[in-house]
Image (spheres, rainbow, N blue to C red):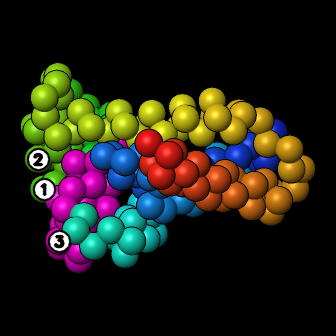
Amino acid sequence: MRSRTAKRSPKLGVGVCTRSHLILSGRAKTGMGSDAPDFEPLLFDAWRRHPRLRVVLADAGYDSEANHRIARLDMGVRSLIKTGVGRPARGNKPPAGYYRRLMKRQLNGSQRGKKYAQRSQAETVNSMLKRNLGDALRARSPKARRAEQLLRIITHNLSLLCDEEEG
């Protein structure tokens, strides 16, 4: 059984425009667990807000064959998701699934100068959130913590838009 602290820990998933650092979608939760189930709602909300979305970049927490299929086949968005979730393959077995094997080949080695290298911009946004708005939540209850995290997304986007008007 998980500790009470693990059940109460905040978790925020964001969909970010890598050019502007604007947060297009967000999912606030409490507790531990896989990020993979959050991929579809995050991608759909980002896709709705940015209709010209063509490529989605995600870390290994969102790795699943189903997520690649949702992005590529259902939404027409190229997905680049690092493999690495689940049990490690025995020996040198490739990951299961067509798209996961493709990712293993395409995202092997340095990504400098390649599309996936832009994923670091999402980490930049996480850093901006913590630096500008603090890394601690004031709320106590899980519901209030989720609301506070979503409010931080709105505040972040407003601050970017205000900075853009000034500059």
Q: At which x and y percent is residue 53? A: 25, 64
Residue at 72%, 34% in the rendered image:
134
Q: Residue furthest right?
A: 140
Q: Earlier in the sequence, mark 3 or mark 1?
A: 3
Image mark for residue 98? 1
Bin the neighbour count of mark 2 within 10 Å (Cα to Cα): few under 14, some 14-19, many 20 and up.
some
Bin the neighbour count of mark 3 within 10 Å (Cα to Cα): few under 14, some 14-19, many 20 and up.
few
Residue at 24%, 33% in the rendered image:
117
Image mark for residue 102? 2
Q: Is residue 44 above or below residue 145?
A: below
Relative to the observer, which residue lies in front, 129 or 157?
157
Q: Nearer the viewer, mark 3 or mark 2?
A: 3
- Kind of residue at disc 3: Gly
Q: Is residue 113 above or below residue 68?
A: above
Relative to 41, is 50 on the left or the right? left
Residue at 22%, 68% in the rendered image:
52
Whether the residues at callouts 2 and 1 have beta carbons within 8 Å, the answer is yes
- Kind of residue at disc 1: Tyr
